[in-house]
Amino acid sequence: MYEGRTAAQAGIVFGHENMGIVDEVGTAVTLLKKGDRVVMPFNVACGRCLNCEEGRSAFCKEVNPGFAGGAYGYVAMGPYPGGQAEYIRVPFADFNALKLPPGTEHEEDFALLADVFPTGWHGVQLSGFKPGESVVVFGAGPVGLMAAYSAVIRGASEVYVVDRVPERLNKAKEIGCIPIDFSKGDAVQQILNLRNGCVAFVFSSHT
Ligand SMILES: [Zn+2]
C-alpha cells in the first residue's frame, strides 16, 4: 500500500496491528472499561452475523457494505482508519478487542496477537498438519516464523525453515527449527538430504 500497488488514497491512516489502552467506551460496550489494555485482530467484525457466528469473522457481512470482511487501515476494507495514530476507534469493541492482563508485561509478545501469530497458526491449521508430522515453511518473515513456531508448539517432529537472510535463519534455529539457506543450493534437495529422502509437509508464507 505504501508503494502504490493498491488504490490507497492520500490521507488514509494505515495500521492494522493495533494494541493500546482503552481511553473511552461507547454506551453499547459492556465488557471493557477505561484503562483496560487490549489488542485487536486486524479484521473488523460484528460478531453476530452468520459468518461471525460460524467463526468466519474475516468474512463478516455487516461491517463493509457490498463486501464480506472489514479491516483497519486497508484499501476496500471499510471505513476504519488504522492504528498508526494516537487514537483508534474500535467498532463492536466487545467482540473486536481482546482484553490483556493489566500492566506492561509482554507488550511486544502481545502485539503479535493482532496478526502475525494467529495468521501463522492458521496457516499451519489450513495445511492439515497433525502433531508428529514434519513441516517445511518457505519464507521466514514474521508470519513464516510464527507459522514455524506454531508447528513447533503444536508438536511437529521437525520444522524446516527456508530463507536466505541470515538473521531470519538464526531466529528459526533459536525457536527450535532447522534453517535451510536456499542461496546455498536447492532447498528441497537440502531437506531430502537431511531426511535421507523422506518428504515432509510443505507450505509457504507470503510475509
Ligand atoms: Zn459479522
Image (cartoon, helix red, strand yellow):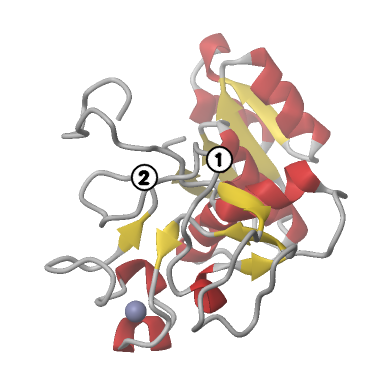
Q: CA distance from mark 1 to mark 2?
A: 14 Å
At 63% from the left and 45% from the top, the residue drawn is 146
The residue singled out by tag 1 in the image is 86
Q: Residue furthest top?
A: 184
| Label 2 secondary element | loop
**153 relative position to 165: left or right:** right
Q: How many labels, in total?
A: 2
Give coordinates of residue 31: x percent, y percent.
64, 82
User: In the image, is residue 3 above or below residue 172?
Assistant: above
Q: Amino acid at mark 2?
A: Gly
Viewer-closest of 30 and 6: 30
**For discs 1 and 2, the disc positioned in front in the rendered view:** 1
- Whether residue 39 can be seen here: yes
Give coordinates of residue 94: x percent, y percent.
55, 78
Ranked by sequence position, the earlier of labels 1 and 2 is 2
Viewer-closest of 24 and 46: 24
At 30% from the left and 36% from the top, the residue drawn is 12
The residue singled out by tag 2 in the image is 73
Give coordinates of residue 39: x percent, y percent.
63, 58
- Whether residue 135 can be seen here: no
| Label 1 secondary element | loop
- Counting other residues with Cα less than 10 Å from the Cα at mark 2, is it few (<14), some (14-19), or many (20 or more)? many
Viewer-closest of 127 and 185: 127
Give coordinates of residue 5: x percent, y percent.
21, 27
Identify the image quadrant of the N terminus.
top left
